[in-house]
Amino acid sequence: MLRITRHEGSEGAVELRLSGSVSGLWVDELASAFTKATWSAPSRLDLSEVTFADPSGVSLLNRLREAGVAFVGATPFLAAQLCDGTQSPISAGPAAHSASAPASASGSAASSAED
């Protein structure tokens, strides 16, 4: 299961907060969250609640990072998976959550099902 929540910060910054597993069908769900016309391109991904990423999830996260999306809050294990030696490692640790209010129900995408 992967929950994707969109938050807008000050000055139009967009953050997607991920909770759960970036694996299987959820990788496609995350990819589509970046291509929806109603969402501006997220400038950062909060990975503090990601519990697992399979190889396709790691691949997508690396492509997003190469496209300029900043990552925050990755666990040391996930940060190590995302560092392939060709890029500087991402910082692991707590995410600096913005003080903005959560997006409305229409501004959030939540997906849930059992794997």
Image (spheres, rainbow, N blue to C red):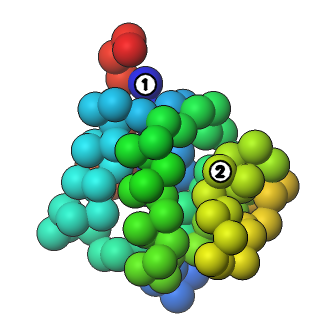
Residue found 50% across the figure and 50% down from its top: 58
Q: Position of residue 50 (x, y in %)?
A: 61, 39
User: Observer-nearest residue: 54 or 93?
Assistant: 54
Rate crowding at label 1 as few (under 14), some (14 to 19) or many (20 or more) other CA atoms within 10 Å: some
Residue found 68% across the figure and 70% down from its top: 85
| Marker count (numbered) | 2
Q: Earlier in the sequence, mark 1 or mark 2?
A: 1
Q: Is residue 102 above or below residue 38?
A: above
Judge from the rendering whether residue 70 lies leftward or rightward of residue 64; answer left or right: right
Q: Position of residue 12 (x, y in %)?
A: 46, 83
Tell me the kind of residue under disc 2.
Answer: Gln
* Mark 2, secondary structure of its residue: helix
Q: Position of residue 113 (x, y in %)?
A: 34, 16
Q: Is residue 109 visible?
A: no
Residue found 42% across the figure and 80% down from its top: 67
Q: CA distance from mark 1 to mark 2?
A: 20 Å
The residue tagged 2 is 81
Q: Is residue 72 visible?
A: yes
Which residue is farthest front? 85
